[in-house]
């Protein structure tokens, strides 16, 4: 089903062009990050000196300063936990809802999808005070739960919309055949809809995890101690009263990105496999 | 599916949305109907007075204009770049999986960190951009990107585009990969060139996903805050003050909770209008089969 | 039966999910107070040690720290969210000098007059006490202070036989002489903070003040002299475009950007806070020997003015343990602790006695200069509406600096927007 297109002259040129374009984009994506990496290796005296392009005496002092902080590891654990929980919750809640929506008549579906968008309509700064009241009333201040709940909701619209789109593409015949075979809706969901939507699930999983990993405003407002603080807040905490230890901040941000980059690399096979999973039609 | 079962499946999502989205919207709207200054202990109901004042406030109108131009340009460029990238990655070539992982890096970098990286890249004295452009002979003397009113908004847009293009790329790639191969074969058999194939096979199949990606990026872009606030603080002279930055300053700097909430609701209305536009476009789509 | 009912009655509140914030005070002895402050990266253990010192002196009080990022805007936002709802979750707070009148007016701070008596206040620098006084009450204990000053390159001035400039014309002349003589495209004359942010307000108030301009009078009314303010703003603009002694970089510069350029040896004069000296002293850069400090220049015939910065310790009005909170605030601003904080963190002390402490002076001779500068330091307009005022000033001054408006127009627009704010609410 997915072999390379038949070798027509025009198509092969396209392939070569594609590789070059992809490589260019990779460079463009990597460059500022690499700049940050080289900044993190610069001794303090060289932080604001350009040229030289590369640090003449690379040092690990900034990394030592960051790792000497006993709480930093704790923050990474918090972020990983909150991110994983958010991704799972979002996929589940979104998946269940999408399952129902894919079968609802157009009007009801449009209403619910439109309502979901309301999550993304109010600026984050306006959400802070009301949500803080809610979090405090529920006694969730300084806990993972507050962040997981809010992050899950913010990632719901994308998950819901994407999965609804993928579920809708599943032919009705499959669905009816399953029902005829005696499968309940629940079983249909797990054995038919989910496996056939791996592409959407993969895309949403990555995007949602990264969203939760990077979210700052809510994390800053709802957390007060290292029990629940996440990594973006940790990076902000390096800032001094007047001083901005940019070397340390650079090292911290590189360390912050590494686990996620690692995850992306580890799972890139799975991500692409999921994305590659074509539609069933034809 | 029966109504009752549908409600069960929809339950968790709807509950979360009610608590985390609808509730704050209601509270914010309620606050926007008041003149509320904690500094004076004032909390009086004024109806729509805040909105009337907003409509005549040149600062609000300017921030709306800044936000709209920011959104239009960034989303358009992100879409073009994301599409080019997704098309390039559609075929399997050696190392394409690693390239995908690398492409995600801007999205992985936290927004506040990314804003700082670009702040230093744009620095007039020791910034990378000036260094490269001077070396390449493109400019004769260093440019202070974030202090020039003509350059500062494009500079912020570039930082934002760098950060968010992977989002587009990933979604568009997911959409592209789900286009059935037989469609391409049929087109090739009919002797269609690359552009015709794109126009008549790829694009129609991709449109639903593309519209989803565009919709979400637009809604995010309308609410842009971090990159602008860290890079410019809304300056110089308030020329990059987007609606979210304006709302933030009213809510948390001057502590005008009523007025700031009104700005928040204005953003909501703007987002709702944009969403309605997109929904209209999507409604006209019929699922196309081969 | 009755025992069970009573037991249930006690358990009920906790079953209802008491918010985690009110930490359970153990029956009878220990009281826990929460101290919220900015986090000093790399010095957490040191802070903890100092706090433990207090706990040893007062075994019945436990201090729980809650750290925040040092970004003033973020802290202001967090305080606003937490204190708006009359929360008792915080007892002692680190406050920026510019918030005190605002928080006091909002009813978020406790008036410390019952415990912070006049003779206790007398031990602190008078300017710091005045800045924390609002409508007859005192709302913060001065924790550490800050004032803007001029850094200069001794070697460059000596090379051209120039003295330390006392007035702005002298500074312009010195800078132009050196720039011409050195003919170094990387060298800047005078660096200051011109980006649109709170730092711009600090610098602007110094420029304005050095021309005898005051903004808010004793009774909270508008007293800004339009002509003089326009002159001062014109000077700021001219430094960049007419005299060309300040590079366009200053329009995007904050404290750190300006500091970095000066540290690289690429500037003759720098306006910044005392912390820069601490950085020079800690590094082994050659720049250290060549740097001198002086009060900021002034307009001829006017006094030199520095913006008074600094942080205070305040007590939450709704705190359940105000007395213990004040005891802690007093301890943390005591002579011994301030000395420690200065030596380790370069936090300028607020107690006058420390500026005469021979031990400290022998190791930090610059303290006497700092004291002189502090005596001429003026806080930014003390008003509950300071944040709104600052926003207006920042935008309009920035507009003049990037030449969207003339200084005359900017000053007029400032007055148009700021006067009603002061006038409408009393």
Image (tube, rainbow, N blue to C red):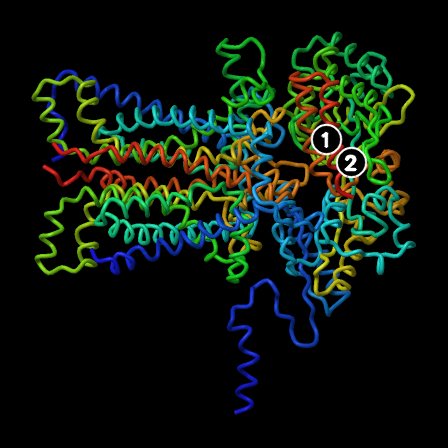
Question: Does residue B137 lie above or below B79 as drawn?
Answer: above
- Circles 2 and 1, Cβ within 8 Å, touching? The answer is yes
Question: Does residue A45 lie above or below C243 as drawn?
Answer: below
Residue at x-position 46% and y-position 29%: B160
Res. C380 mark: 2
Q: Are marks 2 and 1 on the same chain?
A: yes
Quadrant in the picture for the C terminus of chain C: top right
Q: Position of residue C47 (x, y in %)?
A: 69, 53
Q: Position of residue C268 (x, y in %)?
A: 75, 19
Q: Nearer the viewer, residue A52 or C145?
A: C145
Q: Secondary structure at mark 1?
A: helix
Q: Position of residue B284 (x, y in %)?
A: 25, 32
Q: Is residue A196 left or right of residue B73?
A: left
Can the viewer see residue A61 in this picture?
A: no
Chain of residue at mark 2: C
Q: CA distance from mark 2 to mark 1?
A: 8 Å
Question: Residue beneath label 1, please?
Answer: C201
Q: Is residue A158 left or right of residue B137?
A: left
Q: Residues within 10 Å of mark 2 (few under 14, many from 20)?
A: many
Q: Residues within 10 Å of mark 1 (few under 14, many from 20)?
A: many
Q: Position of residue C182 (x, y in %)?
A: 73, 10
């Amino acid at each position: 089903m997915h072999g390379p297109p038949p070798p027509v002259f025009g198509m092969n040129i396209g392939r070569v062009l594609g590789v070059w374009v992809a490589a260019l984009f990779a460079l463009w994506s990597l460059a500022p990050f690499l700049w940050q990496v080289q900044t993190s290796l610069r001794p303090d005296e060289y932080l604001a000196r350009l040229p030289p392009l590369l640090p003449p005496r690379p040092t690990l002092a900034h990394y030592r300063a960051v790792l000497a902080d006993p709480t930093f590891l704790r923050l990474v654990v918090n972020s990983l936990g909150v991110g994983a929980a958010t991704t799972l919750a979002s996929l589940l809640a979104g998946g269940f809802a999408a399952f129902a929506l894919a079968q609802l008549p157009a009007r009801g579906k449009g209403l619910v999808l439109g309502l979901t968008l309301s999550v993304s309509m109010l600026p984050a700064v306006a959400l802070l005070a009301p949500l803080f009241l809610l979090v405090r009333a529920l006694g969730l201040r300084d806990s993972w739960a507050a962040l997981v709940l809010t992050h899950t909701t913010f990632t719901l619209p994308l998950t819901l919309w994407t999965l609804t789109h993928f579920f809708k593409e599943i032919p009705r015949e499959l669905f009816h055949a399953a029902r005829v075979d005696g499968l309940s809706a629940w079983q249909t969901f797990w054995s038919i809809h989910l496996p056939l939507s791996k592409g959407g699930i993969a895309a949403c999983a990555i995007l949602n995890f990264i969203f939760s990993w990077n979210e700052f405003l809510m994390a800053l407002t709802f957390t007060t101690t290292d029990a629940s603080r996440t990594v973006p807040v940790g990076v902000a905490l390096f800032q001094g009263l007047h001083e901005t230890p940019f070397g340390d901040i650079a090292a911290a941000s590189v360390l912050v990105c590494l686990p996620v980059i690692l995850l992306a690399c580890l799972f890139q096979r799975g991500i692409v496999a999921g994305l590659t999973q074509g539609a069933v039609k034809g | 599916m029966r109504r009752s079962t549908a409600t069960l499946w929809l339950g968790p999502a709807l509950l979360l949305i009610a608590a985390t989205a609808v509730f704050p919207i209601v509270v914010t709207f309620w606050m926007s109907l008041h003149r509320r200054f904690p500094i004076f202990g004032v909390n009086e109901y004024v109806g729509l007075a805040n909105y009337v004042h907003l409509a005549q406030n040149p600062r609000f109108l300017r921030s709306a204009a800044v936000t709209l131009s920011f959104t239009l340009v960034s989303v358009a460029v992100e879409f073009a770049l994301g599409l080019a990238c997704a098309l390039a990655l559609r075929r399997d070539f050696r190392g394409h999986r690693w390239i995908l992982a690398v492409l995600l890096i801007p999205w992985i970098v936290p927004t506040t960190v990314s804003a700082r990286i670009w702040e230093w890249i744009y620095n007039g004295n020791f910034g990378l951009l000036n260094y490269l452009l001077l070396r390449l002979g493109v400019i004769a003397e260093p440019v202070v990107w974030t202090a020039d009113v003509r350059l500062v908004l494009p500079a912020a847009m570039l930082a934002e585009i760098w950060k968010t293009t992977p989002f587009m790329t990933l979604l568009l790639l997911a959409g592209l990969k789900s286009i059935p191969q037989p469609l391409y074969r049929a087109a090739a058999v009919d002797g269609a060139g690359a552009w015709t194939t794109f126009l008549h096979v790829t694009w129609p199949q991709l449109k639903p996903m593309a519209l989803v990606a565009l919709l979400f990026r637009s809604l995010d872009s309308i609410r842009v805050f971090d990159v602008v606030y860290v890079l410019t603080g809304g300056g110089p002279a308030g020329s990059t003050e987007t609606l979210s930055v304006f709302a933030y300053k009213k809510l948390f700097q001057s502590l005008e909770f009523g007025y700031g909430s009104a700005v928040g609701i204005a953003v909501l209305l703007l987002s709702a209008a944009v969403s309605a536009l997109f929904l209209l476009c999507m409604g006209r789509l019929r699922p196309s089969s081969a | 039966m009755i025992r069970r009912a009573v037991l249930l009655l006690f358990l009920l509140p906790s079953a209802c999910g008491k918010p985690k914030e009110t930490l359970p005070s153990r029956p009878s002895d220990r009281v826990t107070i929460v101290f919220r402050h900015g986090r000093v990266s790399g010095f957490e253990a040191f802070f903890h040690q100092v706090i433990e010192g207090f706990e040893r002196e007062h075994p019945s009080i436990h201090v729980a720290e809650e750290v925040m990022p040092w970004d003033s805007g973020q802290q202001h936002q967090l305080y606003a969210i937490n204190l708006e709802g009359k929360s008792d979750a915080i007892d002692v707070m680190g406050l920026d000098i510019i918030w005190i009148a605002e928080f006091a007016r909002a009813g978020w701070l406790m008036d410390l007059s019952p415990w912070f008596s006049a003779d206790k206040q007398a031990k602190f620098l008078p300017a710091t006490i005045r800045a924390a006084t609002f409508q007859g009450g005192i709302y913060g204990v001065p924790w550490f202070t800050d004032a803007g000053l001029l850094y200069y390159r001794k070697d460059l001035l000596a090379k051209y036989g120039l003295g330390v400039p006392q007035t702005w014309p002298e500074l312009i002349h010195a800078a132009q002489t050196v720039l011409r003589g050195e003919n170094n495209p990387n060298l800047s004359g005078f660096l200051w903070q011109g980006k649109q942010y709170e730092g711009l307000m600090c610098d602007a108030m110094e420029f304005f003040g050095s021309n005898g301009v005051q903004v808010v009078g004793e009774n909270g009314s508008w007293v800004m002299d339009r002509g003089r303010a326009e002159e001062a703003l014109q000077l700021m603009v001219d430094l960049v475009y007419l005299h060309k002694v300040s590079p366009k970089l200053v329009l995007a510069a904050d404290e750190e950007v300006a500091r970095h350029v000066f540290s690289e040896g690429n500037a003759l004069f720098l306006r910044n806070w005392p912390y820069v000296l601490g950085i020079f002293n800690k590094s082994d850069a050659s720049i250290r020997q060549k740097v001198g400090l002086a009060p900021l220049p002034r307009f001829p015939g006017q006094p030199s003015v520095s913006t008074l910065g600094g942080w205070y310790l305040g007590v939450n009005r709704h705190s359940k343990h105000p007395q213990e909170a004040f005891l802690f605030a007093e301890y943390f601003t005591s002579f011994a602790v301030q000395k420690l904080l200065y030596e380790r963190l370069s936090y300028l002390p607020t107690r006058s006695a420390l500026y005469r402490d021979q031990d400290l002076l022998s190791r930090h001779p610059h303290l006497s200069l700092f004291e002189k500068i502090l005596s001429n330091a003026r806080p930014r307009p003390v008003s509950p509406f300071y944040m709104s005022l600052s926003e207006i000033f920042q935008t309009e001054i920035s507009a003049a600096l990037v030449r969207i408006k003339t200084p005359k127009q900017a000053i007029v627009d400032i007055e148009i927007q700021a006067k009603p704010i002061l006038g409408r609410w009393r």
